[in-house]
Amino acid sequence: MKFQKKIFLLFLLLAISVTMITGCGSSVSGNPKGSLQDAVVKFGEAKSYNYSGSFTLNFDLDENFLATDPEAAEGLAILNSSVINFRGAQTLEPFQAEFELSTEVDYQGLKLSIEIPIFMNTEAMWIKVPEFLATFDPTFEALSGKYVELNFAELAEMSGEEVPDLAKEMKAQMELQPKLVEALISPYEKDYFTSVKTEDVTLPTGVDTKDIVKVSITNENLAAFLTTAIDEVLPKMMDILAESELYSDVPEIKTELATAKEELAASKEEFLNDLEANKDTFSINKFDLLFGIKDGVQNFQSIDLDMNFNDAGETHAVKLQGHIYVTNINKEPEFKYTVPTEEESISLFQLMGLFMGAY
């Protein structure tokens, strides 16, 4: 099962690389690859937007495998029945951002609704304490409805570091995206990219996008796809991150990226040999990436991954589905939350004191 884990983790790495790069050129139908590159670059220039989406991750493991680990079976049952939803908003001038994660899980017959809002500006970050925690620890009852405030100036003083310039960092992240997109897309031949009509795909309710570019990885093109990823895509992305202004003051990041790049090159031959030797132990049922473009800007993307793994006579299936939809690009974003009042918030130091007193 060792190689199967490697191949699945590599798929996840590439999928996350694609889906985290969201944020006019030629005709989509005539040049889908070029249109996608142009559209994502234009999104990288956005100064404000709203976004929302969801994802699910399901593991259908062989019954014989699960019978040996009841706790793992229980954990998988919770994971497989959960849909993770998220939404947020961001503006650079002035800097303000919010992110909200929500889901509902079934834990030993108890329905738990989990909602975690996060709000931040240039001065602090506020994280709302999830109400379900009081179910497991009475100490959290006193924190019901409260926000934990992480004041950047206080944290910087504690650590001896400078107060972060979040507006500058966020701008640097947005400027980094087009470079990563170029590294991610350019090495692949145009054959990987196709234009599809919106009526030929199932879009989430409420999604308004015009042109769809589809990237499909199959059993037939897998080896070539991964070879290009190892030879060109991942090394180039590591170089771009190492040279980024975001990490100019973090030399250990550059060292870690350089080490990872060397290890990737050193393990290439072994990995590709293992891929060939184990090609009958896994199968891609579907691996589709959809990118939606409206008014020349990327505003939607999704992933649909369905794979089977065979190991010692046991068959396991893994499915990953998710999407993100962006609205109000370069318009006034809609914020659900504001800076909490003093009555609504508790400092990190107060929180530490509360738990020290409880235990």
Image (cartoon, helix red, strand yellow):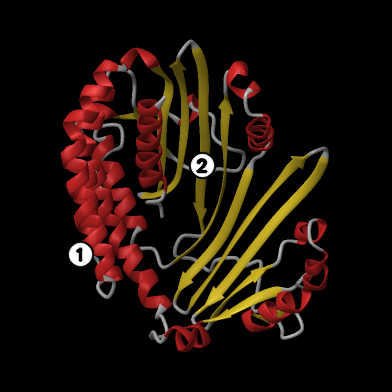
Q: CA distance from mark 2 to mark 1?
A: 30 Å
Relative height, residue 154 to residue 203 (above, below): below
Looking at the image, which residue is at 52% across and 87% down? 154
Give the tally of numbered discs.
Answer: 2
Q: Which mark is residue 142?
A: none
Q: Nearer the viewer, residue 9 or 88?
A: 9
Looking at the image, which residue is at 41% across and 87% down? 160
Reading the image, the residue beneath label 1 is: 243
Rate crowding at label 2 as few (under 14), some (14 to 19) or many (20 or more) other CA atoms within 10 Å.
Answer: many
Relative height, residue 5 to residue 173 (above, below): above
Single out the mark in the foreground, 2 or 1.
1
**Mark found first going from the N terminus, 2 or 1:** 1
Reading the image, the residue beneath label 2 is: 323
Tell me the kind of residue under disc 1: Glu
Q: Position of residue 22 (x, y in %)?
A: 40, 52
Tell me the kind of residue under disc 2: His
Q: Position of residue 171 (x, y in %)?
A: 35, 70
**In the image, is 95 to the left or to the right of 65?**
left
Element class at badge 1: helix
* Mark 2 and mark 1 residues within 8 Å of each other at the beta carbon: no
**Which quadrant would the C terminus be assigned to in this image?**
bottom right
Q: Position of residue 276 (x, y in %)?
A: 24, 18
**In the image, is 106 to the left or to the right of 209?**
right
Element class at badge 2: strand
Q: Quadrant of residue 150?
A: bottom right
**Which quadrant would the N terminus be assigned to in this image?**
top left
Looking at the image, which residue is at 27% across and 22% down? 275
Q: Quadrant of residue 8?
A: top left
Q: Quadrant of residue 264?
A: top left
Residue 326 seen in the figure: yes
Looking at the image, which residue is at 28% across and 69% down? 247
